[in-house]
Amino acid sequence: MRELFELRGADPQLLFSPYCWRVRLALLHKGLDFQSRPLCFTDKEPLACSGQQQVPVLRDGETVVHDSVAIFQYLDRVYPERPLLGEGVAASRARLLERMISQALRPPLLKLLVTRVHAVITPDDQAYFRSTREKALGSSLEAFADPEAGAVQLKQALAPLDVWLAEQPYLDGDSAGGTDYLVGSLFFWAWCLGIQPWASDSSVGVWFQRLLEHYQAHCGPVKRAALN
Amino acid sequence: MRELFELRGADPQLLFSPYCWRVRLALLHKGLDFQSRPLCFTDKEPLACSGQQQVPVLRDGETVVHDSVAIFQYLDRVYPERPLLGEGVAASRARLLERMISQALRPPLLKLLVTRVHAVITPDDQAYFRSTREKALGSSLEAFADPEAGAVQLKQALAPLDVWLAEQPYLDGDSAGGTDYLVGSLFFWAWCLGIQPWASDSSVGVWFQRLLEHYQAHCGPVKRAALN
């Protein structure tokens, strides 16, 4: 029995957390079935088995693993076919890419998405999200949100990925690998929250569409928030 | 006979180009001797054998290779011991890291360094550098230079590398690899031009010092520009 504890919106079918998307994409890559356990931000009790309070958490038989990168490492160790991160320096470089690319893309995406996250979650989660994020950001969600600036900064941050993806179909080369899922999850985050702040016909846009269609072909349609 | 055509300042011993530093560090990693052929920006004629006009150019017996990343690939192919980029997805990820990290670090470093480059080159090179760079930047060198803003932006860009290097001694893990040289070369650029816009006791600072001392232990002292 394999279970993925993952974040949901007020609609239990609306999944948007980029860290949880990573694990869904990784499990599909490995060809591993799982039961989804969608949780609200404030549903902390089912996560107690992991010794911490953040999704994603994967329970695989007797083993419980948290943290998306640790889950990738676990999957590669236990299911070595079709490596995600791979071994040695390949794995190290994927993990460093994850940090560098997240550092470049997350801040502009957050400016675009923070009020959208707030809009799609339950009232209890809204109170939790507002209080924890406003403390971390040092400002109100509304003051932090800045879709125009976020879109401009995102475009700049995507430029090297766009050049790269004009040269090969996936970040990891000829076929999708761990780097594609670690980075692509940020695009699922935006897409599921109802926006697509990149051009459909850009190399990055074509690459995301390829990841999305591959996922939907195997797992069915992805729920998208209906927000203006 | 192995020759490296590389950029020099007015002082022929002052080497500062980050792209050339990459190749010096890579040749040391492979344990390969070479003759240095230091060239001014405007010495294009010795590069004709490469079919283009940019340093670094490596001539290795009958083979001539230009472009620092292509030189890394060549060295790994012909001298496979102690891989720089490695193979398959490991090599692909190193090349993507090079793009992402250069995109993050080069713009702030350029604000810190552009007038320093101009100050250390020959009068002919100064005219060439000013005209080509001002056209590319769309402003005068002096208007583009902004050491204060560059230092602030660099600090922010270095943050994820600093966290990473607090966890392992090198970007590529337990020992220095291609990623360390591709990125470290940007630090040699600043250091050779007389500044060190990072804290000596930061993880990034300790890592650079390790690369520098390793280089100096094998190749002798590195010439530094005496600028205010």
Image: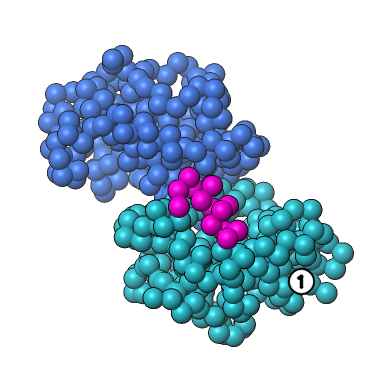
Chain colours: A blue, B cyan
Instruction: Determine crowd level at label 1: few under 14, some 14-19, many 20+ residues with C-alpha closer than 10 A.
Output: some
Asked if A114 appears above or below B219 in the picture, the reply is: above
Q: Quadrant of residue B41?
A: bottom right
What residue is disc 1 on?
B3
**Can residue B170 be seen?**
no
Front-lying residue, B64 or A105: B64
* Relative side of A22 to A126, left or right: right
Most frequent secondary structure within the magenta stretch:
helix
In the displayed structure, does residue A107 sit left or right of residue B56? left
Secondary element at tag 1: strand
Q: Which residues are magenta?
A: B127-140
Q: Is residue B34 above or below residue A87?
A: below
Q: Amino acid at mark 1?
A: Glu
Spot occupied by residue A91 in the image (x, y as percentages of width and height): 53, 53
Q: Which residue is at 71% across, 65% downward?
A: B43
| Residue ID at (40%, 26%) | A197
Give the residue drawn at x 24%, y 43%: A53
Camera-side residue of A227 and A60:
A227
Q: Nearer the viewer, residue A21 or A164?
A: A164
Quarter that holds the N terminus of chain B: bottom right
For the point 42% across and 50% down, which residue is it? A99
Q: Residue A54 appears at what percent x and percent y?
A: 27, 42
In the picture, the quarter occupied by the C terminus of chain B is bottom left
